[in-house]
Amino acid sequence: MKQLLIIALTFLSTAAFSQKQLPIVKANSKTAKILEEDGLVKGWNIDPKTNPDVFITTKLVKAKTVKFKTDIDSITFKLKPGEKKDFMVLLNGKDSCYTQIASPEIKNFSKIKPEIHDSISLFINSESTIYVKSVFNKIDTLNLNFDSGTTELVFTNNVLKNKIKSNPKLYDTYYNLNIGNSEYKTKVYPAELTGTGTDGRFGWDLFDGKIVELNYDQNVMVVHSVLPKHVTKDKSFSKLNIKYFSSLFLVESTIEQNGLKNTDWFLFDTGYHRTAMLDNDLLKTGNFPTDKMDVIKKVMMHGATGNEIPVITASLQTLKIGKYDLKDVPVQLITGNKPLRGANIHILGNEVLKRFNTFLDFQNNVIYLKPNHFYSDGYVEQKKSGA
């Protein structure tokens, strides 16, 4: 009986192991690449010491193909929202590296009771920087920019050194951030720059699964657990689909000059205080007549890390967002270092976005825009040039 029991246990153990056997990808180099279906490519370092070694994709709203490619081999998965795929990388024929590719969990707060409608005073300054009062780690009261073009929480190096009493550990530790009546968990990162007059910035992902209302007529930011019913009934709202890219989100818009139209995806970036930044490579691909645009000025701008970005400001005849046309918009043309991790993407900034009362619906992945009292105001660059 004892021998039969041992044999049975051995059989069950072997069967269980075979069920857990993972696909194997071979590699002779620690450097690999992860390619998402939309063309996004991420570098990856194969590490036998990390178990499991997890790569998180951008937020998925539908199934997407993801490919893991080493110097000699590859594996491709069809990844659904909230799904994980495990495999083993065999490095130099001897080191087994347990690796996982996962899409972020699906968040949706629409069913919680009671409903959340957290109203927060929203401030905007002359540089089109929007910010709210917040409390970090229950100690530090700060003015923080709501920057939809970033994630998590960022403080400037100066604020980290001279203002914050909490002395936070960067990158890996979660801290409490109180905004309005709600508390959020977030990691902390450093940066050289942030919105004018603010101590740092927080990203859209704090509100994933909720709806964020930016009402510039009433100077409030409201975090909702359900979309207010009047939004879908109000025909003056324009509805835009969200596309997620590298943990950020984009909307489709159209630019027009001398009768030629280009429609493409724009980063929706409330943290960028100008009107729009147009990517030179995309303009060339679309044969856009930049030579027909009147140049307003040429300057050197700085990215969030302090990197220099040479920029030409020129007048764009039409910028179409949803069903609304903005005319004679002074836009920036990128001629050098790209601000978004080397990607070819246009950017919508808050000097344009502030002209619309907005609902960012991170449940259904759409945005609703409606013109407000800023809509017909002149642009900063026009005022500076005397136009």
Image (spheres, helix red, strand yellow):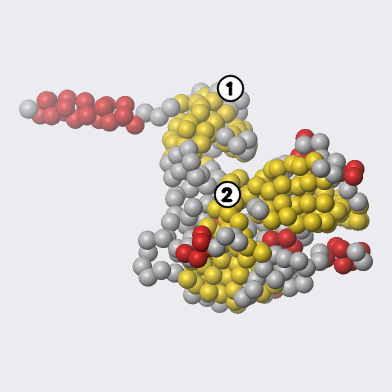
Q: Amino acid at mark 2?
A: Asn
Closer-to-camera residue (311/6): 311
Q: Badge 1: how crowded within 10 Å, few (<14), some, or many (20+)? A: few
Image position, residue 63 (x, y; %): 48, 38
Q: Residue at x 61, y 56 (%)?
A: 238
At numbered mark 1, what does the secondary structure look like: helix, strand or loop?
Answer: loop
Left or right placement of residue 365 versus residue 325 in this view: left
Nearest the eye: 239 or 233: 233
Q: Nearer the viewer, mark 2 or mark 1?
A: 2
Asked whether the residues under the numbered discs 2 and 1 touch, taking CB atoms below 8 Å apart as contact, a structural biologist would say no
Residue sitting farthest toward the front: 235
> To which residue does mark 2 refer?
241
Quarter of the figure with residue 141: bottom right
Question: Which quadrant is the C terminus positioned in?
Answer: bottom right
Residue at mark 1? 72
Q: Secondary structure at mark 2?
A: strand
Which amino acid type is marked by label 1? Answer: Ile
Front residue (pair 324, 302): 324
Of label 2 and label 1, which has the lower sequence position?
1
> Farthest left residue?
1
Q: Nearer the viewer, residue 342 or 214?
A: 214
Residue 113 seen in the current view: yes
Question: At 89% across and 66% down in the image, what residue appears?
Answer: 384
- Residue 72: give x, y in percent of width and height: 58, 22
Q: What is the CA distance from the residue labelled 2 to the residue labelled 1?
A: 38 Å
Determine whether 299 is above or below 167 in the image: above
Q: Is residue 265 left or right of residue 285?
A: left
At 59% from the left and 52% from the top, the residue drawn is 240
